[in-house]
Image (cartoon, rainbow, N blue to C red):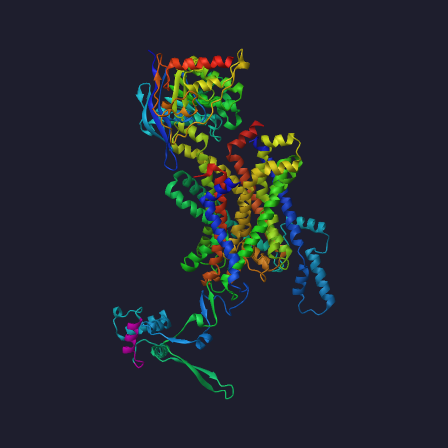
Amino acid sequence: MKRTLRQVFHSPKFVVGFSIIMFVVLTVLIYPLFVRAAPLEIIARGTFFEPGIYINVFDSMGSPKYILNLDDAAAKRIASKLSDQERLDMKDWLVADGILEEDIDITDTKNLLDQWVKNYDPKKEIPGMTNARRNYFTRLNESLKGILSTEGAIIAAKNAQTGALEQTGTVAQTDYVNVSQVANKRLLLLGTDNFGRDVLTELVSATGVSLMIGIVAGLIATTIGLVLGLMAGYMGGWVDDVVMFFTNIFTVIPTFVLLILISFSIGQDKRGAVTIAVVIGFTSWVWTARAVRAQVVSLRNRDHVNLSRLSGHPTARIIFTDILPYIASYVIMALILQISSAILAEAALSVLGLGPRTTETPTLGLMMNWAMIYQAQILGKWWAYFPVLLVIALVSFSLNLMNTGLDQVYNPALRE
Amino acid sequence: MTTVMLEVKELTTKYITRYNEDVYAVDHVSLKVEEGKSLGIAGESGCGKSTLALSLMGYYFAPLHYTSGEIIVEGRNISGMDRDDVRKAILGKEISYIPQSAMNALNPTRKIINFIEDVLQAHDLYVTKKDIYDRARGLFETLGLPASVLQQYPVELSGGMKQRTVIAISVLLLPKVLIADEPSSALDVTSQKMVIKMLRQLMENGFISSLIFITHELPLLYNVTDDIMVMYAGQIVEKASAKEAVFDPLHPYSKGLMGSIIVPESGLRDVKLAAIPGVPPNLKNPPPGCRFAERCKYVRPECKVITVNPHELPGGRNYRCIIPEDELRAIYKKESVQHAR
Amino acid sequence: MKGYYRYFGKKMVWFFITLIVAFLLNFILPRLMPGDPVAVITQRATQGMTSAAAVQQVYKDYQELFGTNKPMLTQFILYLKNLAHGNLGVSFSQYPRPVADIIRASIGWTIGLQFPAIIIGWLIGNMLGALAAYLKGGYDKVLLPASIFASSLPAFGMAVIILVIFGVTLKWFPTSGGYGFDMIPNFSWGFIWSVIVHYQMPFWSIVLIIIGGQAIGMRSMCIYELNADYVKYSRFMGIKDWKIVRYVFRNAMLPQITGLALAIGTIVGGALVAEIIFSYPGLGSTTLAAVVGGDYPLISATTLIITLMVLIATFTIEILYGFIDPRIKAAQSEQ
């Protein structure tokens, strides 16, 4: 046993796969200890906030101010205010005014602004320019003036009694706050989803639920498969015929069809995460049963089994002591595969809308489903679906890797 | 003057393991087989006899590599020959090989006759399909195999039948040397007898000019081959005629092998069965000196240090031991007397 | 041919038994659903009606129509009879459109998409896997991890990735539908071209996923076969390498065909979900719409049709296998 463990942990594939899945499991377990927020809590008003650090503006106004004189602060400020379209428009105007195109670099904010300030004159007549466009440039110029000024902003509050605005403070362009001193901030590493929920927290929780579903379903499926395979393989005769009859039928009838039918029939209310896990478990045992049966049949006539039979050992004991240890490795591999496929099955079900209820816990499949319904892919809101996909692929990949590693340990012919 | 069909001089071949270590599985082996004669090679599992068989063909593929030595087939030196030439001219034609587990040697999805066509085609001997069929049928019938086998798939044949089919295919091109690698090990006793009978028949009818029979069952060789070589840890430790090797072995290992055989004779009850303790050395780092020294009953201090070369005796016999012939005979005689008491 | 009868006969019997079980399941499971769908329809149809008696009458009429007021066995026989006539009932969510009509509209798209995709994916995947086993070295080192990755992704995952890369970012292909929104199905070149363009992304998503799965399997099979005894013996009898390689591929293909028969259920399932990602007008989207609309005749019908398709595919493959594997022919003629 110890030697097998050592061999197993020497297999590079197994170790890599194992580490990845352990990392995922640990994250799922440890993350909630640090971040106490509820995963399905709607914290944003509006959809698909981008990932980033969100700092409360109101609080930062009241936090201690520090003066920093940074060289490029002004340029950066202007650069962020001036959109690409506006720069192109400015270039258009300047070119129409007679400035050579090569002299204009729209990426060089400072020069562009200098040229603009030097040349722009609202009264100039540009041939072919409509009135509306001319007004546009006037407005553009006004807003630029605002950007270029170095005055700060004034904070005012309504006087409770008179209703008039009274100045309560100022914010200079060189005022900075220390983020750690701002009372309210929220790190949204993966932004928010369409409902306004923190994607990262949701994702961690969803991974946990999906893993749980995978493990429960995998265990159920493997157990059923193991029991049926043992019975059919060892006892033979009519037991074998009956079991194989059902197995053959369910091999051909696609499992996901059964899943769809059963999930649908249960109805929305009854579909909890555990229920779905059970349903998946009860419909995916077929492959394991077949594989176990094949192994047991080949073991049935081995000498040690015959010896036990001749010695009069009860069937149950023979199965436990003579057959199980030999197929143990096989069963473990089957379990890993079942877990992996159960997770994928749940994801597919959820995408169809037949997964666990949407109001209690998120699952990986559900997150994909939401992203899909609200068109996250098309809108380019990658954080709503890409991390989910990555986690699904990673979990599936690591489990498969573990399995391949184990396979190579137990089946030397496959070693490279 | 009988022609020497196969002469091997100091052949050394090695395996290169995945960790880039060299394992010299065949270490300076020399042998000679003459026309019409058969040579048996005996040794325990892992001594290198199968590797020797592969090496003799002259066709190497990873991880087996040729290191040094000569292989001369009827006067023609084939060691170091281009692989493709070896494949076309030698394999199956000059030297042919019967694999150990002939049961699985046939492609399960190809009819026997089609496989035969492939073999002939590979040697540019493709005539018409009818000619091939006639030739094959002729050979099979001569060897006692029904012609119907040709149209069947391997899965339809019994184990013994498959083995004999493989032998027939191997001699199709009338090779000069036939190497049989444990041809009877996987069969029941009746089939074993049939296989050996077939091999003898092949020699008598001239289908093959010489035979090398490899086995771990020493007593089998007495009834099959003219000469016997005993192999241990990649080296030949004794070469003698069959009678001499079985009844008058000189090398302590050969003696030990014969001593572990039960020969029905009077006084059997009093003879103790002697097993050779220990295991063969690891060929990655073969010990200096005699490789059998660890397990030898008569080991002397020098044995583990000096390189032991074959000790030649008149009549073409040799054995790899530093103890002189008469001394060994004396030791053995003393022992047998002791046992008889 | 005579020898095959037994083999085919057995397969046919299985086909029919499985078919009956499929019918049973498709009939029973949705009807176990709690709640009364007829009541829902009645409610929808009688909005605005004030007379309780009239509502009751409407309810009874619908019950009659859908047969929910009869015992299960009668319903089942009715169901089978209807099936024989191609009547799959009336859709709840798209009332009064008959279910058969809805299915007829979408089944063509699904078959047209999946059938070629599965075949091509299988062929390419097996070729790549075989090459990897034969060539080894650098080619193998690239193919293996890529295949492992592709086979770890669920089908819809690949669909999403392709959608985002080629549809949204590169804008090479349209992101949804089977044909342009502004088009009406006809046989003009414009329409056909639009169909082809919309076909690419779903098609290649399915193909890539299948390649991933097949390549790995074929590679393992080939490695196993390349080490088989008959390869060594063939070599020693002087047979050329490339001929031996042909032997190996042929032998490794056989279990792959069987594997395809076993896996086709899962493959089709994954492909259907991929269809949904692309809003492709096939059975996948129909199923989704049915689920969302709580439409159990439609769900029952789509699952039945999907099961039928998979059944037919599986048994066709098994029969083909009987022709291809010479050992089956031999075993039969022996008897």
In percent of width and height, residue A381 lies at 46, 63
In percent of width and height, residue C311 lies at 58, 44
Instruction: Choose between A233 and B286: the one closer to the eye.
Output: B286
Q: Is residue B174 visible?
A: no
Using the rendered view, name the quadrant where residue B334 is placed.
Answer: top left
Which residue: 59% across, 30% down?
A: A303
Using the rendered view, name the quadrant where residue A181 is placed.
Answer: bottom left
Instruction: Choose between B207 and B278: the one closer to the eye.
Output: B278
In percent of width and height, residue B84 lies at 34, 29
Is A164 placed above or below A223 here?
Answer: below
Q: Quadrant of the C terminus of chain A?
A: top left
Q: Count the marks.
A: 0
Is C147 placed above or below B46 here?
Answer: below
Which residue: 51% across, 66% down?
A: A196
C67 relative to B84 in the view: left or right: right
A294 relative to B313 in the view: left or right: right
Instruction: Choose between C32 and A327: the one closer to the eye.
Output: A327
Q: Is residue A26 visible?
A: yes
Is B247 placed above or below A397 here?
Answer: above
In percent of width and height, residue A18 lies at 49, 48
Instruction: Choose between B136 and B270: the one closer to the eye.
Output: B270
Q: Residue furthest bottom?
A: A162
Q: Is A113 covered by the magenta stretch?
A: yes
What secondary structure characterizes most of the magenta part?
helix
Q: Is B289 covered by the magenta stretch?
A: no
User: Which span is picked out in magenta?
Assistant: A109-123
